[in-house]
Amino acid sequence: MAAPLKAVDGNADLQALMTDLGTRARAAARVLALAPPEQKNRALEAMERAIRSNATAILAANAEDVAEARTSGNATSSFIDRLTLTPARVEAMAEGIGIVRGIADPVGIVTESWQRPNGMTIERVRVPLGVVGVIFESRPNVAADAGVLCLKSGNAVILRGGSDSFRSCRAIHECLVQGLREAGLPEAAITLVPTRDRAAVGMMLSGLNGAVDVIVPRGGKSLVARVEQEARVPVFAHLEGVNHVYIDGSADLAMAKSIVLNAKMRRTGVCGAAETLLVDRAAGKNLKPLIEMLIEAGCEVRGDVAVQKTDARVKPASEDDWDTEYLDAIIAAKVVDGVDGAIAHIQNHGSHHTDAIVSADETAAKKFLSEVDSAIVLHNASTQFADGGEFGFGAEIGIATGRFHARGPVGAEQLTSFKYRVHGTGQTRP
């Protein structure tokens, strides 16, 4: 078996290392595309065990990353939250691997089959994409999520985590490689870029001489913008989550309070967190208790004039606030004229990620779900359900906000394409 790649600094031959990395991943992808489900599941079972048995080492590595981030002086509380692993979060990683192992293998599934008048049978069958490049920031659990989803879908993956989570990702990656080794699969099936050198990102975006088939960015707006601008291979866009919760005039106040509080404050640093609260003018009686609840929970509220009148602690909202992903305990709030006003605001300021309506009016809910052009739309549920695990995918490689190929949580099935198999009995075309 080939020796593992070693970390290099910016003065070493990074180009040669990255080219070699891509070559190994391409060779591994050919093996994975033909690997039986049982072999992939053996690897996943071993990875799940390895994550649990090495939890102490993973947490120790993460503690070093967090300590370094804190000393930098630039890390926000939400950034630290995304970076930090806890025993519960490590266990959730292991549980996610178990769920991925239990879902149906998408490779080789015949999605459609039909017969032509000339007797030929045509089948459309799912196949892996090939080599997936995943570029992510801060959240080290993405290494596990992306690695196991790509394995399940028969793809090799090249992971490039953020410099801040370098130690954590290496500790997690070692567990994934252990699983591959135990199942007799090539270790290059899940590769972690072994350097913090930012030039490695640019090389991945170039496609590594044709080795990379698709790039998935998972991070902030600046990362996604760079990927979309520089990538020479297809990209699964993952834009920021400027997510809205709209409280309709018919909404039950208790339900509205529960959903808004969870959508904003459960974890403020995740992409599914609500960033804007829209309240129907007809639900004016609900506005004040909602705003008071948020402020008392430690959330800063920036509102329009109508919202400011409800509580002196509300700060004036600027135009920029309607387009901001705070990833912090801050929310913009606005009064709108019914569901049409909410939809219009979301069309003008949303990021096509996740938006929710709280309403007892089925007609209003149906209109919202039909007309809001976002990857995920919810009725009477928190935006924090924007997560592949909550969708039953076990994990996600990201939330795709584009319109091509994949949209919403990208799980194992969304990491496949298809080909046509045609069965004939000697037919020739006249």
Image (cartoon, rainbow, N blue to C red):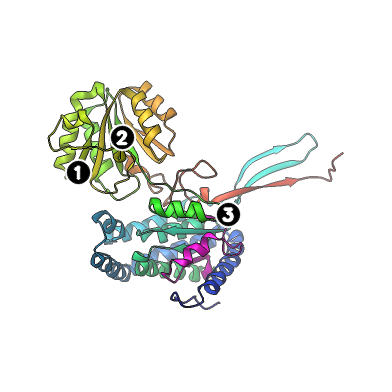
Q: Which residue is mark 3?
A: 129
- What secondary structure is found at the residue carrying circle 3? loop
Please name the residue shown 39% across and 33% down the image: 348
The kind of residue tagged 3 is Leu
Q: Is residue 197 left or right of residue 69?
A: right
Q: Which quadrant of the figure contains the N terminus? A: bottom right
Badge nearest the viewer, 1 or 3: 1
**Is residue 83 covered in magenta?**
no
Please name the residue shown 31% across and 40% down the image: 320
Q: Which quadrant of the figure contains the C terminus? A: top right
Please name the residue shown 27% across and 48% down the image: 268
Q: Residues within 10 Å of mark 2 (few under 14, many from 20)?
A: many
Q: Is residue 120 left or right of residue 106?
A: right
Note whether residue 184 is visible.
Answer: no
Write the start and end of the magenta stretch as one range: 187-215
Toward the right, the furthest residue is: 430
* Mark 1 vs mark 2, CA separation in Å: 15 Å
* Mark 1 vs mark 3, CA separation in Å: 42 Å
Residue 245 marker: 2
- Mark sitting earlier along the chain (1/3): 3
* Mark 3 vs mark 2, CA separation in Å: 35 Å
- What secondary structure is found at the residue carrying circle 1? loop
